[in-house]
């Protein structure tokens, strides 16, 4: 009986390790992004379901990441409004532009979903 449980734990651990490897942290965006070892079409139904479930968890954090970047932009704009040094103004504008670019990319990733055939995978809510 104990050996059977150990086999299940090892299988779940190996699957979780595989699943974690499908998403690599992106330091610019602050979220893990999909980086599949095998093409989507070659994954079995369980692997696809796991990837979609993990992506939905990651995707759920994107609005908070966007709001944090928007707060950064507001703070930088406040600084820019009072700044008189031209070089510092250029630097602040660059930081604002970078934050806006991150927001844009996060919005694209937020809209990214992988369609699954319902008959192959049942999603649990």
Image (spheres, rainbow, N blue to C red):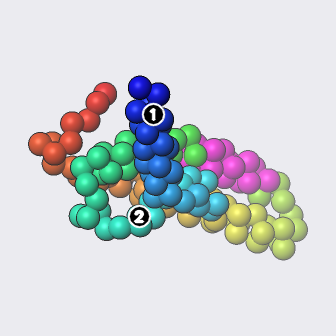
Say whether residue 61 is visible. Answer: yes
Secondary structure under badge 2?
loop
Which residue, given by chain and number where applicable, does mark 1 sit on?
Answer: 3
Which residue, given by chain and number where applicable, does mark 2 sit on?
Answer: 36
Question: Residues in magenta?
Answer: 66-79
Quarter of the image holding residue 91? bottom right
Name the foreground residue: 60 vs 35: 35
Where residue 73 sits: x, y (%)? Answer: 66, 52
Name the foreground residue: 100 vs 55: 55
Where residue 6 sits: x, y (%)? Answer: 48, 35
Vertical order, 92 against 77 (above or below): below
In the rendered image, residue 69 lying in the magenta stretch gets the answer yes
Identify the residue at image location x=16%, y=45%.
Answer: 120
Where residue 108 sits: x, y (%)? Answer: 41, 58
Identify the residue at image location x=41%, y=64%.
Answer: 36
Quarter of the image holding residue 95? bottom right
| Distance between the alpha carbons at the discs numbered 2 and 1 | 32 Å
In the rendered image, residue 43 lying in the magenta stretch gets the answer no
Q: Which numbered disc, 2 or 1, marks the residue that appears first in the sequence?
A: 1
Q: Main secondary structure of the magenta part?
A: helix
Where's the N terminus, which quadrant?
A: top left
Few, some or many residues within 10 Å of mark 1 (<14, 14–19, 20+): few
Q: Nearer the viewer, mark 2 or mark 1?
A: 1
Q: How many marks?
A: 2
Where residue 55 sits: x, y (%)? Answer: 41, 48
Few, some or many residues within 10 Å of mark 2 (<14, 14–19, 20+): some
Identify the residue at image location x=55%, y=47%.
Answer: 66
Secondary structure under badge 1?
helix
Identify the residue at image location x=43%, y=39%.
Answer: 7
Where's the C terminus, which quadrant?
A: top left
């Amino acid at each position: 009986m104990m050996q059977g449980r150990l086999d299940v734990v090892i299988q779940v651990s190996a699957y979780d390790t595989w699943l974690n490897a499908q998403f690599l942290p992106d330091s610019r965006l602050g979220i893990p992004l999909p980086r599949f070892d095998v093409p989507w079409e070659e994954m079995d139904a369980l692997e696809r379901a796991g990837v979609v479930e993990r992506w939905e968890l990651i995707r759920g954090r994107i609005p908070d990441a966007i709001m944090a970047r928007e707060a950064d932009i507001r703070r930088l704009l406040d600084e820019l409004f009072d700044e008189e040094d031209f070089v510092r103004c250029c630097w602040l504008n660059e930081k604002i532009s970078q934050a806006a670019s991150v927001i844009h990319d996060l919005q694209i990733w937020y809209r990214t979903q992988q369609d699954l055939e319902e008959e192959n995978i049942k999603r649990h809510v």
